[in-house]
Amino acid sequence: MAAPYDNWSTAIQAARTRLNDRVETLAADSGKLLDLAQPHVQRISGDAFRKMQEFLASLKYSGLEQEYNFINLPPAGSTDPLVQVSLGFAGYLDGSNPINASFMLPLTLIRPYKLWERQNGTPNLLTEMDEIINGLPSIPKMTWNRQWEWREDVLYMPGATVNTDVRMRYGGFFADPADNSPAANTPWYGQVIPILRTVDSLADYICREVSIARQDPDGAVAFQQSAEANARLMVARDTTQAQSTPSTAQLGKMQDRYTAKEGAPKTIKR
């Protein structure tokens, strides 16, 4: 049995009800504001879907969490502590050699949440890495990276002296609604919304986009507040949130943690 996902026409119908679908148009063509035949409705729906996903991702909703493994990631191109390695949407930079397009961030990524690593070619368990803000420290290269930083949509690490395997858990997004994708021979509004029980929040986000186009700032604010409240209900019933427990790395760091000094990099745990 297929998962009980709603389709886009259901969300549009819910938005129509909330707006009372006034006969106003955003384009030169005539027709109701949220008529499925109007080309601007697909764009409005896509914009609303992006906005909702960004908010859900900020709350770490598990429906947007994905994992990706980088196997046999090359070592840093230099042992100089100043050299860092980086993973971006274009590829991997080891600090010395040209970009390596064999390793790149998933194109659906919004932001990394957690990283683990081990030396490649070993059956060792993966060790959780520390997320750093305010800059990676310049430290001698070792057989692991240990730390990572996210800035300017690029993942930075100190670089290891050996090839490593890195697992990344991240917030990822779904594509805008599109004709014939993922279901063939199906218009965009007949496609499923790939997040369970999302119509309430998504319909409000669609109404927000319409209110902005109508130059109705009060309506836009009200619909956004309602959309976010409904999104929080989705997160509240997300059972993985309640089951979260301290990781092995977190438990190990509860003792003997250094006292952060002025100017020292800060480690943050999620």
Image: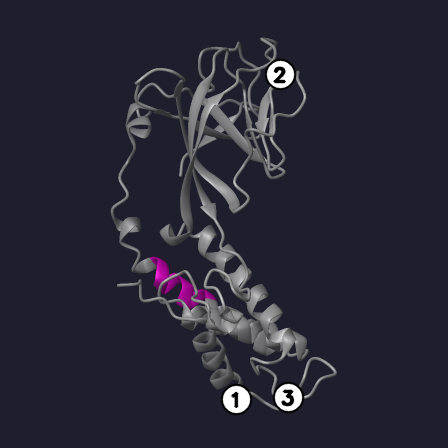
Chain-order first, disc 1 or disc 3 = 1
Mark 1 touches mark 3? (CB < 8 Å): no
Residue hosting label 1? 20
Please tell me how crowded label 2 is: few (under 14), some (14-19), or many (20+) other residues with Cα within 10 Å. Answer: some
Would you say residue 122 is visible in this rendering? yes
Q: Earlier in the sequence, mark 2 or mark 1?
A: 1
Which one is in front, 2 or 167?
A: 2
Q: Is residue 215 above or below residue 172?
A: below
Residue 169: image location, x then y, percent: 41, 38
Residue 144 on the magenta span: no
Task: Say if 96 sits above or below 42 in the image.
Answer: above
Q: Cα distance, mark 2 to mark 3?
A: 59 Å
> Which residue occupies 46% across, 65% down?
228
Asked whether residue 217 is in view, the answer is no
Q: Quadrant of residue 216?
A: bottom right
Residue situated furthest front in the rendering? 185
Q: Which residue is mark 3?
A: 31
Q: Report the coloring of the rendering.
A: one colour
Q: Is residue 33 left or right of residue 73?
A: right
User: Which is more N-terminal, label 3 or label 2?
Assistant: 3
Marks 1 and 3 sit apart, C-alpha to C-alpha, by 14 Å
Compared to residue 39, the image places residue 86 above or below, namely above
Secondary structure of the residue carrying tag 2 is loop
Q: Residues within 10 Å of mark 3 (few under 14, many from 20)?
A: some
Specify few, some or many for label 1: CA neighbours under 10 Å numbering under 14, 14-19, or 20 or more.
few
Task: Choose between 249 and 49: the one closer to the eye.
Answer: 49
Task: Say which residue appears at 34% left-offset and 15% top-offset.
Answer: 122
> Which contiguous range is marked in magenta?
228-235
Of helix, strand and loop, which one carries label 3? loop
- Number of numbered labels in the structure image: 3
